[in-house]
Amino acid sequence: MENILEIKNLHTYFFSDEAQVKAVENLNLKVKKGEVLALVGESACGKSVSAYSVMGLIDSPGKIVKGEIIFKGQDLLKLPKKKMQAIRGQDISLVFQEPGSSLNPLYTIGLQIDEMIRAHNKTASKEDRGKRILELLNKVGISNPQSRIKDYPYNFSGGQAQRIMIAMALSCEPKLLIADEPTTSLDVTIQAQIMNLFMRLRQELDFTLILITHNLALCSEVADRVAIMYAGRIVEEALIEEIFKNPLHPYTKALFASIPQAESKKARLKVIKGAVADPSAKPSGCHFHPRCPLAKNRCKVNYPEYREISPGHSLSCFEI
Ligand SMILES: Nc1ncnc2c1ncn2[C@@H]1O[C@H](COP(=O)(O)OP(=O)(O)OP(=O)(O)O)[C@@H](O)[C@H]1O
Ligand SMILES: [Mg+2]
């Protein structure tokens, strides 16, 4: 299958007087056209920074210091700002992790969606844009949209606000949508509704989806493939069925062990021992070694090569 996106050797750092935060370090990831790829990892492992890097949204003190982001055959990092602006929203779109980053509390949602459409389609008439806004709100399941376009973000529930953000992200029919923790702030039933919405929209609109989440259970329902990220790198990658049947990297196994089991509500959620590696002072060798039950001396010295161990299943670990 053709790749829609290929991230090669990406390094995105944040610089301050005291530290150099290596948020993303040697990230390699291929996204196949039409798939749902889940990008999974604990807090601060670099998921959002990876998404912002693809979107061209890394600003000072952040910098992409090295790498390539190939989208439809061109390196986005080599494009002039104007061209990147055109791609952002039009070809690649992001549903932000923080609702506040997308919805402005001071403007009606109709106006905000209208702006999004106008930014990429300067010739559309007011009438056509109005029709499009209603169509989008309908698509994302806002009932009676005509009566809602003059409402402000605070007039909507968390789940509805998320739907509106998805409508905005889809307004220009992007080929690639990145959804950054799109359901984290929602309760479980609304989470399921939003995931169903994504799946329905994907069939209707035919886009590729990168779903960023720390919730492995959530991706089992919707993802085709999973990439597990730790301390700024991908440590394991496989088809969804394979990763559930046969997780291999000790970090992936630990993530699975930390999923609460519905049957044993009283059992305590197992936490992964130790803290996520500090991106300004990552452990030597394999960054997971201080938390890893299998770690040997060589794990403290060298970073294990990322290798394919069966078709489509890759990982970086010396001990597997
Ligand atoms: N603007 C910034 N300045 C300095 N450091 C930053 C900045 N943005 C992100 N970082 C750092 O980069 C690292 C990766 O952050 P990122 O937001 O990508 O994590 P994440 O995997 O999305 O986590 P979460 O699941 O909590 O959203 C973190 O250590 C974070 O503190
Ligand atoms: Mg994040």
Image (cartoon, grey):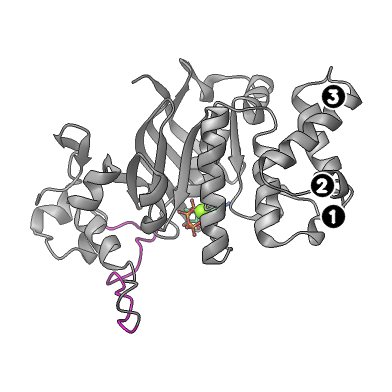
What secondary structure is found at the residue carrying circle 3? helix
Do the residues bearing badges 1 and 2 touch, measured as CB atoms within 8 Å? Answer: yes
Which mark sits nearer the N-terminus, 3 or 1?
3
Front position in the image: 144 or 91: 144
> Image point 19% across, 63% down: which residue?
292
The span shown in magenta is 266-283
Please give the label number shown on residue 128. 3
- Label 1 lies in ligand 2 vicinity (Cβ under 8 Å): no
Type of the residue with mark 3: Asp
Instruction: State the residue position of label 1.
Output: 152
> Image point 69% across, 55% down: which residue?
160
Tell me if I can see residue 320 in this picture.
yes
Instruction: Report the predominant secondary structure element of the magenta stretch.
Output: loop
Tell me how far mark 3 sits from mark 2, CA to CA. Answer: 17 Å
Do the residues bearing badges 3 and 2 touch, measured as CB atoms within 8 Å? Answer: no
Q: Residues within 10 Å of mark 3 (few under 14, many from 20)?
A: few
Instruction: State the residue position of label 2.
Output: 109
Q: Is residue 130 left or right of residue 89?
A: right
Quadrant into which the N terminus falls: top left
